[in-house]
Every structure is written in C-alpha cells, then in structure tokens.
Amino acid sequence: MKAVYLQITLLLISFSLFILKIPYPIELAIAIPTVIKMIKISRKIRVKRF
C-alpha cells in the first residue's frame, strides 16, 4: 500500500511542477479534477485497508 501512496505523491509533485512551469488556466482545468480524483482514490484505498 505504501507504493501506491508514493505513486500518488509523485504524481501530485509532478502535477504541481507542471502547473508552476506552465501556469495556464487550461492546465489548471486539467490538473485540478485529476488531483481530486486521486484524493478520492486514496480515500477509497484507506477505507479498503482498514
């Protein structure tokens, strides 16, 4: 399960770097929903774990 969390954190870091490099509304519009989806997925993983 730790590997999954590491992958999610790496994705979040890459997204944040991508947004910082290219601060366009289109990129934000694409990135924000994906981050929300990842948070929801991580919550589901936590629920399954316990």
Image (tube, rainbow, N blue to C red):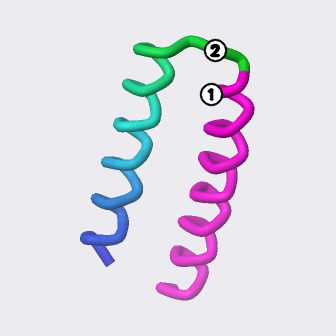
Is 28 covered by the magenta stretch? yes
**Where, quadrant-wise, is the N terminus in this rendering?**
bottom left
Q: How far apart are marks 1 and 2 (CA)?
A: 5 Å
Residue 7 percent location from the top left of the image: 32, 60
Amino acid type for the residue under numbered disc 2 = Tyr
Q: Mark 2 points at which residue?
A: 24
Amino acid type for the residue under numbered disc 1 = Glu
Residue 41 percent location from the top left of the image: 60, 68
Per the rendered image, the range of residues in magenta is 26-50
Residue 18 sits above or below residue 48 on the image: above
Residue closer to the observer: 50 or 45: 45
Q: Which residue is drawn at 53% across and 74% down?
A: 46
Is 24 covered by the magenta stretch? no
Q: Residue at x 60, y 80 (%)?
A: 47
20 horizontally vs 7: left or right: right
Residue 11 sits above or below residue 43 on the image: above
Residue 30 percent location from the top left of the image: 68, 39
Residue 27 circle label: 1
Q: Main secondary structure of the magenta part?
A: helix
Residue at disc 1, secondary structure: helix
